[in-house]
Structures are given as structure tokens and as C-alpha cells.
Amino acid sequence: MKAWTVSDANGDTGVDYIIFAETRGKAIRHALDYCDGAFDWCRWTEMRAHRLPALDSFYRGEPEMNWNDMDDRVAMVRYAGFRCSDEVMVNVEKCKHCPAHFWCDRYEGMLPEETEDSP
């Protein structure tokens, strides 16, 4: 199985899914049919899917990666640049408890900048 990131072509939903499928078309079809209604208003021609070969090895029989599974989350952040939605209120202390914070650009953006005078 191949890993694909699937979203609407215009980015109107702000939602991306990592879907495992044999082809781009099958990944889009899965997103349109099964992704929590995120793309209910989309037509086939309004969808996009891009390969993510770095995530191919994370296929475990499920058609989607699950953000709430911490192993999946780490892979999604580390290899695909995912992060918590901007609608999710987080702070540095909350982020430290997330196992993906080491690779998260949102977490990095919350850290104070280091200067030459910093210890």
C-alpha cells in the first residue's frame, strides 16, 4: 500500500488525511466516502492526493492514519509536517506531553528565541 495525503484542491476545508491506497484515485475515493464528512461538499475534481513515500512503511492494515494514535501522530508530524489545528488551544507545557513535539513546527514557534547571551 502507498501513503497519500488527501485534501480538497483549494484548501478550503483545511483538512488533510493520510490514506493508504494502491492508487491516487482510490485514495481520493476513500476520502470522499469515509473521512468523517470532511469532504461531503467536494466533487472528485476538487480533490488532490500527493504521494508520501516516507509513510509507506507505517501501513498496518488500516486505510487511514489516526491522529489520536500516538505512533501515527509522531509519523505524521515527523514525516509529513502535520501539527495540531490552529483551533486547538495549546501551550508549551501541553506540547511537551505530546510525543511528536520534537518535530513539531508549532511547538518550535512557541519556544522563546535563544540569543547569544542565553545560558
Image (cartoon, helix red, strand yellow):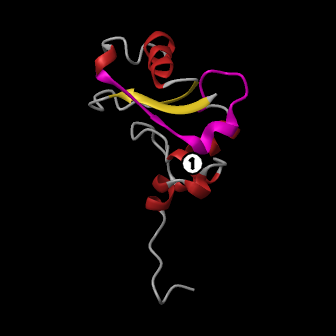
Q: Is residue 26 shown above or below 85?
A: above
Residue that appears at 46% across and 69% down: 112
Q: Is residue 55 shown above or below 16?
A: below
- Name the quadrant containing residue 3: top right
Q: Mark 1 points at which residue?
A: 79
Q: Where is residue 37 in the image (x, y as percent from the top left)?
A: 43, 13
Q: Is residue 80 shown above or below 104?
A: above
- Which portion, as a residue range, is magenta? 46-67
Q: Where is residue 34 in the image (x, y as percent from the top left)?
A: 51, 12
Q: Please identify the quadrant where the N terminus is shown.
A: top right
Q: Is residue 63 shown above or below 40?
A: below
Q: How crowded is mark 1: few (under 14 residues within 10 Å), some or many (20 or more)?
A: some
Q: Where is residue 115 in the image (x, y as percent from the top left)?
A: 45, 83
Left or right of 102 in this view: 51:
left
Q: Residue furthest front?
A: 23
- Name the quadrant containing residue 42: top left
Q: What residue type is labelled 1?
A: Tyr
* Local secondary structure at mark 1: helix
Residue that appears at 49% across and 41% down: 84
Residue 110 included in the magenta stretch of the image = no
Residue that appears at 50% across and 51% down: 91
Residue that appears at 49% across and 44% down: 83
Residue 48 included in the magenta stretch of the image = yes
Q: Observer-nearest residue: 10 or 109? A: 10
Left or right of 79 in this view: 57:
right
Q: Please identify the quadrant where the C terminus is shown.
A: bottom right
Q: Position of residue 19 (x, y in %)?
A: 55, 26
